[in-house]
Image: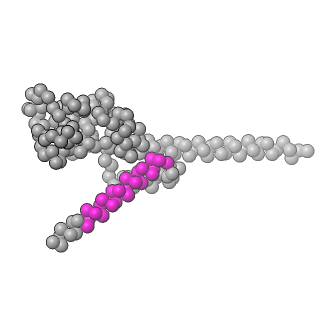
Amino acid sequence: GEAGPAKPLLKVAEVEEACSSLSGALRGLDEWLSRCALLFVKPQCGRPLLAVLRNDTASAGMWPPSDDENLLCCACCTPDTLGVPSEVSWVGCDECDGWFHSYCVRVPDAVAETLDSFRCPRCCTLAGAAYAFGSAALPPPILTTMRPSFRATEALLAAADGASASRTAEACAVRALLEATARWREGLRGEVGEAERA
């Protein structure tokens, strides 16, 4: 008769162990997702991590950038972009309401201060119009992520396994970005090799 009560206690211990294990896995996943967001999401960006990783243009807050995004974030650069002056003027597009560092959209600061109207390179391209401050063929790209290095992204993906995150949609999106980057690198190497042989 004494063996009966021990069995429910054993089940309680098993449930406690499973809960503890699950709690640890969730902490690891949360830490990995936070690390991923720090690596990819621009400061003050209101877009969800997965939308940033997938470059989901239908996501709310993408375009035009929100007021909070515009305060600290130019759509054409990241906070660690080299070459952007620390003191720079801002110009606002009259069509999409996006705000840009004048430097990033090639508008001289002296001109930026006197503009009555401004159409950003993206809106010019969409309208098929010439951009007033540079080549319409090469408008500055809209940078939707922090543009982390390939190695940092590889390390993040490797850490996903230890954080129980390897099967998440975010890890799959990071993996797809790495694969696309690797294909781009290989194509570039091929083109450089052909150019060197010519």
- Which residue is at a point 30% across and 35% down the rendered structure image? 63
Nearest to the observer: residue 186 or residue 72: 186
- Most extreme residue toward the front is 128
Q: Which quadrant holds residue 49?
A: top left
* Left or right placement of residue 112 versus residue 52 in this view: left
- On screen, residue 177 above or below 84: below
- Which residue is at a point 22% across and 31% down the rendered structure image? 95
Nearest to the observer: residue 3 or residue 169: 169
- Residue 5 seen: yes
In reply to whether residue 187 is colored magenta, the answer given is: yes
User: Which residues fall within the magenta stretch?
Assistant: 168-190
Tell me the quarter of the image containing the N terminus: top right
Tell me the quarter of the image containing the C terminus: bottom left
- Which residue is at a point 23% across and 45% down the rendered structure image? 141
- Most extreme residue toward the right is 1
In reply to whether residue 49 is colored magenta, the answer given is: no
- On screen, residue 133 above or below 90: below
- Which residue is at a point 17% across and 34% down the rendered structure image? 119
- Most extreme residue toward the bottom is 197
- Residue 86 seen: no
Q: Which quadrant holds residue 184?
A: bottom left
- Percent position (x, y) of residue 6? 82, 44
Q: Which quadrant holds residue 90?
A: top left
- The coloring applied to the image is one colour
- Percent position (x, y) of residue 185? 29, 61
* Left or right placement of residue 29 versus residue 101 in this view: right
Count the marks: how many?
0
* Left or right placement of residue 158 versus residue 80 in this view: right
Nearest to the observer: residue 66 or residue 158: 66
- Percent position (x, y) of residue 28? 51, 45
- Predominant secondary structure in magenta? helix
* Left or right placement of residue 75 versus residue 114 in this view: right
